[in-house]
Amino acid sequence: MMGSSVSCFIFSSFLYNLIYILVFLNLLLCFSFSQPSCHDDERTSLLQFKENFIISKSASRRSTSAYPKVSSWTHEAETRNCCLWDGVECDEKTGHVIGLDLSSSFLYGTIDSNSTLFNLLHLQRLNLSDNHFNYSQIPTAVKRLSMLTSLWLFDSVFSGQIPSEVSELSKLSALYLCRNVDPFSGENLLELKNPNLESFISNLTSLEVLCLSQVYISSTLPKSLANLTSLTKLYLRDCELKGEFPVNIFQLPKLQELSVRFNKDLSGRFPVVLNERSSLKKLLLSGTSFSSELPFEKLASLSVLVVSGCNFSGVIPISIGKMKQLTILSLSENKFSGQISSYLSNLTQLNYLYLHSNHFSGPFPMPIFSKLVNLELLSIAYNNWIGTVEFDMFKGLTNLNVISLSDLKLSLPHINETFPQLRELDLVHCNLRKFPEFLRHQKRMESLTLEGNHIGGGIPEWLQNINRETLRILSLSTNSLTGELSPTTCKLSSLIVLDLSHNMLVGKLPNCFGRFSKSLSSLILTNNSFSGNIPKFTERNQLKHIDLSYNLFEGKLSHSLTNCKMLGHLNVGSNELNDVFPYWLGTLPELIILNLRANQFHGVIREPRTKLHFPKLRIIDISYNNFIGKLPLKYIQSWNAMTSTSVENFGYLTSLSINFSIYFDYVGKPIFYFPAYFDYVGKPVFNFQSVLSIKGMYRQFDGIQNIIAIINFSNNKFNGEILEVIGSLKGLYALDLSKNSLSGSIPSSLGKLAKLESLDLSQNELSGQIPYELAQLFFLQYFNVSYNHLSGSIPQQNQLSTFESSSFEGNMGLCGIPLPNLCGNSEALKPPLGEDGEQEESSSLFQFCWQVVVIGYGCGFLVGLFMEKIVFPRNAY
């Protein structure tokens, strides 16, 4: 019995061990099949490819999950199987590398056709997106990867012409070449000119996804795009497309997503008949010239419709109620009118609704919005609605976190902590007289804009204590705020923009303002009554825009401004500063706009004492001071930025608005949003005001063109001659040397300033004749040489023949039209005739009203660019 039990036990143990061994062998066999060993030559190629790059965290900016995938690639025996490396995918049967995903891998360096990457001839999927390939061209050797079905090269700083060899990859189903932009200027780097778009796609008949957003194409869209019958997604954002959009593209049977946004010269209309079985889900046309009425009834399948900044008009019909799949609807900045259909309340899936800047009228449609229970963002500002908006209507919208209600009359009853927690609130021009109490209970506010109201009194401590860690935008501009600023303001540690301009604030700025949050980019305190010295600024600050103009600041300009290495715009005009010319500002590498006007700066502007003499300066105003001596030759010779007629290399000077606009990712979901004041292409814009005396009048201007250079040295005590070298500053649009003691003749070299639109040399001691070369200034719209000692005949050619007598009066020796004293030879005064016998005509690139805006100069620079590139991700599609 005992022997039988032992035998049974032994047999059972044998079976158990046998099963264990078989299971182990089976698992080992399965593992060997699932983890093939890579080929030696492919492993070597990958390692050599890795050696061409350095690992830099700044090379990958778009993904929070970025990490250096190639760090796992080594020669070590235990990791020799490259199929186990991060980002590498091998064929389970052959062991060949068929997939390589190095997206967001911190790769920095160049890549060319000699790269060992192109030895991986079995590759089917290649993703190099979100790296920095240092302006490399896309290598022509890419054609060797003939098995590719997917190629991702977006957001990786490739530049130049897209090679025709890419179009030889006939198996491609997904091609992403979008968002290759200069990290500094934002300029599009890739272009598709030779081959053009039509030739490029002719061989890519298997494409399902084509992304060429921010590729410079600058042509019409070929109708042959409609031949790509497998296409599901087409992204052509910001490509400078022109002409009429081919309506047959709307008929593509599988097309689900279409974006042609920000092509302002692309026009189009919807076809009379749309495919009833259309699979289109996302349509993004904003910033184009599409027009007519929207056929809402034909777009019922859409989940995303973004048509802001187009030319659409008409009323919102009841058929909008059929678009029940919509999650994003943006109709802003069009010409829609009338009352909004109550059927809009049927769109209960809506998360984001933009209706601002249209012509909607009638009673404010409160019941409609209160039923959209899934809303996260609502922007309905700048329409023609009447009645009072009861702000507590929004308290039932528990998902709401962004509201823009500007230009509406608000009723703000007491609202307690049950109100939704907001991220952005825009209540501009809402007739508010005090700070909304419900703000006390907001814990995660990121942008608060209350400008243009009637809020009086001091800034309450509780407002400066809430949201210290989250608040990034605070604009209380153009109210009636009084009192002094508390040091508590400096505790807003995440603040990027602080705008307290156009109030009645007084006193000295707290010393902490010079060592404000390291994130602060824009400090705007213009038009208050701040006094005392300008604070000292600490090192490593992020300030790019400082506007302290129209206050009572006194003393010397602080040398600590040299710590503001990113500063692009400095405006301290109209204060009581008493100092010599701040030559040391010339060391600031990014300074483009310098305004010192109407202070007590004095003395001779001596030769520069530093090697850097304002390397990027394009606008300088030192008018209404007490400078003496000769014009500063060495400085003017060093202003190389003004010699350029283009600012392609000066992307720092960008139109900027206190509220940031919306960006959508490739599926149409907002990546970030700061409502209101969108520009027509949806880019962030800051709109800073400036004041300048022009034509004897002070005017306030709200914007600036970014292709200008301006010099204003008027109302000082400069003497000597006008420098010939000024004629080399070919980017000048305005030159004002009036009301000085300049003598000698007007240099003929000024006739080389082909872009010049405003020239004021009045009230000096100039003599001699008006150079005939000035008649070649075809864009000249304002000209004044009055009250000098000029003589001879007034040139009658082109623009000079169009100005009134006031431009020439006070020169006893001048004669000819338009003055009453004619010259001896009246025939010589007639303007020359063109080849066809007609009087030659000249035209300005811009109307004079634009030129006036230009001279408003002081407005835009890099804050918007900074916000777009550093703080928030930029979208490709």
Image (cartoon, rainbow, N blue to C red):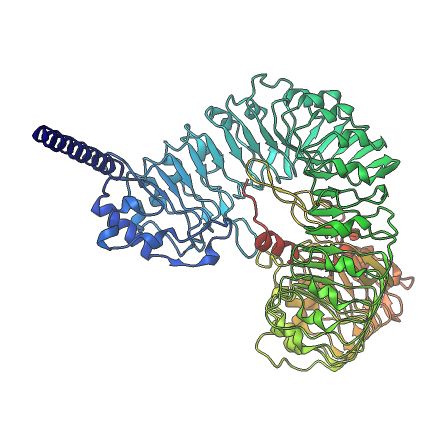
Residue at figure coordinates x 56%, y 20% from the top left: 278
The answer to which of 423 and 61 lies nearer the viewer is 423
Say whether residue 550 is left or right of residue 614: right
The answer to which of 113 and 571 lies nearer the viewer is 571
Is residue 843 at least partly visible in the picture? no
Is residue 712 at least partly visible in the picture? yes
Is the residue 863 above or below the residue 24 in the image? below
Find residue 65 and report its horizontal and vertical position in percent. 47, 49
| Rendering quarter of residue 471 | bottom right
Find residue 315 and report its horizontal and vertical position in percent. 77, 26
Residue at figure coordinates x 68%, y 27% from the top left: 348
| Rendering quarter of residue 836 | top right
Q: How many marks?
A: 0
Find residue 837 and report its horizontal and vertical position in percent. 74, 46
**Residue extending farthest right:** 820
Which quadrant of the figure contains the N terminus?
Answer: top left
